[in-house]
Amino acid sequence: MNYGYFDGPNREYVITRPDTPASWCNYLGTPAYGAIISNNASGYSFVESGAMGRIMRFRFNSVPMDQPGRYIYLRDAESGDFWSGSWQPVGKDLKDYKSECRHGTGYTVIKSEYSGIQTETLYYVPMEGLYEVWNCKVKNVGDTPRKLALTGFVEFTSDSNYEQDQVNMQYTYFTTRTYFRDKFILQAINENCAEAGVTGSAGTSDERAEGIYRYFGAAGATVASYEGDRDTFLGDYRDYKNPISIENGKCSNVLNFNKNSCGALQFDVVLQPGEEKTINFVFGAGGNDTAAKLVTKYEDMNQVAKDLQGVKDFWYARLDRLQIETPDENFNHMINMWNSYQCLLTFIWSRTASFQYCGQRNGLGYRDTVQDIQGTVHIDPELSRERLELMLSAQVDNGGGLPLVPWGYKPHTIGTPDDEDYVRATQHPYYRADDALWLFPTVHTYINETGDYDFLNKTIPFSNIGEGTVYEHLRRAIQFNLDRQGVHGLPAGLHADWNDCLRLGSKGESTFVAFQLYLGINNLKQYASRFGKADDIVWCDSLLTKMDATIQENIWNEDRFVRGITEDGYVVGHRDNDEGSMWLNPQSWAVISGATKGDQGKIAMDTVHEILNTKYGAMLLFPAFQKYGLPVARMALMNPGTKENASIFSQSQGWLLLAETMLGNGNRAFEYYKEFNPATMNDTAEIRKIEPYAHGQSIEGIESPFHGRGTVHWLTGTASTVMVGMHYGILGLQPDENGLRIDPCIPSDWSGFKMSRIWRGKTLKISVFNPAGVQKGVTSTIVNGLEIRGNYINADILKDGGFENEIKVVMG
Ligand code: GLC
């Protein structure tokens, strides 16, 4: 079943049926002010942190689905009939109620039509400021004059700490009150401690001696009635579907003193046939003056168009850096807009703000964040570099990464997992085996994108003590794993090794980490060669020789690489095991790392195809764990076929793509891509449930009765990892220090495709032709009319600025 479609030219996903099988969301905002909004206008907003800066209330996992949000109610004064500008919360019969939601880059438009009245509400957060705008147009499309009550409604949190807001009512019931100021409702929290003009700063109320203000205002019409008290607005034993103040056609001008605040502003709107009126609602963090100023600002009806252009300009400048036109529309949608967009959103919000992530992890997870950067380097190299430097500065001097890097982190301030203060602040007493190893592919991607090899010489502090060049940071990342090994000489799996549910401990060994380490050593060797560090080259070579022997002796198992060896010698992922006898990541990573010998890569990837492939992508492992469980296989805690216990873990699909393209298998790589691409399931959305335009963390595997159902939407390492597989693997855009190799790996039935790429200030217009129907291989490359040898284009033959470098690549 289909609930909407991709509008490529407008860079929007259009939801035509509002009764989607899950809330289909979009993100609005900047790092200073974030918001999530569903196709039914539900969601929440926060200043900086989803956990500590929550200003709009939302109930996770609620029934009815995902409420409340940013609601606009309408009521016909004559009939008394009422509805909402988004289908929910009133939920009129869809026979009579028409709705369309357009999710775009940093904005969402929700349209409705019911009983001869149309509404169109544009929701967005301007590029600057701690607020959001709901630009609401209401139009009479019937042929009789209409008298309406239009009410905008929002529920404020009582505490910026979302958890306190939800559970600590013995406290938060007594800290808030609201005021009506003509054009806005002002909410005050801890008002007795307030100083004039204090804004919506984050923190827990009972630990903070300051007041906080938020507001909900409107421009473009005169407020007829208002409510600041949520319970008065809703009425006893009612909910958002039928608030008493809506049923009555006017609010009763009650402000809250204790309990729960809301902002409800009602307007009397009289519309002649064909007439349209606009009201701009503004909601945000800030005091009286801020609110008054903003309401005045949005009396100017041109302001919205200017703001929206600013938001679009920001996003389009980034998306335009890579645009493609291939025979596969769904692939195009993901590269041109949705996957790229998801990369940057995930980069910004990490794993802290969605309808499943509530913000509790109040900071940046090391591995996730370093992985995320790999997907944004080509979209925004500057921003990526800033974050990369932050993550390098969160590397401990022993080479390991801090498992959690709190928001606002500064090196040399919070200790390490071995120190009490760090553990108290983050609840993370253990290192993960893989965290700092992700620096290798990310640093590599960064310097290849920018050509900035000097970055390796930049000095950056370690998190606890001292400092070192980026090169030295990488060297220590290797040392960290060398210092933590098991009896076979493979790296220990520690508390987790990418897989949060595989606890191999300090003696059990991880093959996934072994492959990562192998790649890392190779990278370091390349940098050592470049800088003439002879000792390090020797060191790397001796490590690689040793690892080759260890890998071949201990972890190749006929047609697959095993997943690990526990402290007591149990081989996880051995083909004779009853459970988890086949794993995806060690196969793809064996190929990516370059550690395979002879046909091993091909054989291992064929086994993946044979055992793990499903119609929605390849499972993480098979069969699921049900008997062999803790302490090692923590995934046994989960139902079979879900999450780490044999789902189609979405992030792993990205490595699968990359590995298949490295082997030259364009057909198979694309077969997998089509299986797990959310857009492929646009017409079977009732199976996938979550958004067809965003990856989720996983898709349930064949052991689940809901095979194909997507879970944990939006914020996932899948975005960056799949982007890497598509960008560097399938499209074959492979920059390095001096130039760019174009080496696509595509389905043989593609006769060609086009790409446009902005790279180091140069615009590249690339046409790829595939007359012989191959999967990989380039026979000729023509750059601005001149044929070059091979498929490697030296950067200095490309012209800068607005000049469009025409590149023709013929495969064969
Ligand atoms: C989740 C975590 C990620 C981890 C993965 C596998 O996606 O965010 O850090 O690697 O699960 O366990």
Image (cartoon, rainbow, N blue to C red):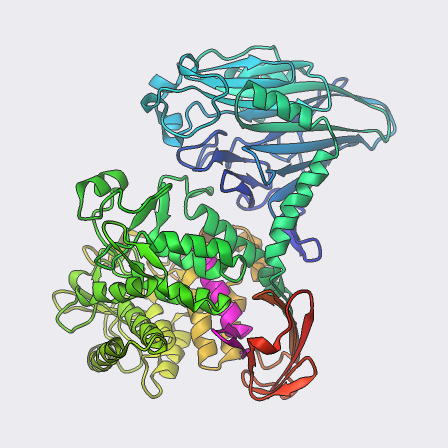
x, y percentage for residue 521? Answer: 29, 73
Determine which quarter of the picture holds residue 352.
top left
For residue 277, say whether it is visible: yes
x, y percentage for residue 461? Answer: 30, 53
Q: Is 624 on the left or on the right of 809, as rendered? A: left
Q: Residue visible at 37% across and 23% down?
A: 205
Determine which quarter of the picture holds residue 97.
top right
Name the quarter where the N terminus is drawn: bottom right
Residue closest to the eye, 48 or 581: 48
Q: Residue visible at 35% across and 56% down?
A: 367
Figure disc tally:
0
What's the magenta region?
716-745
The answer to whether residue 545 is above or below residue 700 is below
The answer to whether residue 691 is above or below residue 221 is below
Residue closest to the eye, 144 or 454: 454
For residue 706, say whether it is visible: no
Is residue 617 on the magenta stretch? no
x, y percentage for residue 486? Answer: 15, 68
Q: Residue visible at 68% across and 79% down?
A: 784
Residue closest to the eye, 269 or 385: 385
The answer to whether residue 447 is above or below residue 812 is above
Is residue 741 on the magenta stretch? yes
The answer to whether residue 584 is above or below residue 20 is below
Q: Is 396 on the left or on the right of 391, as rendered? A: left
x, y percentage for residue 759? Answer: 57, 67
Residue closest to the eye, 720 or 535: 535
Name the quarter where the C terminus is drawn: bottom right
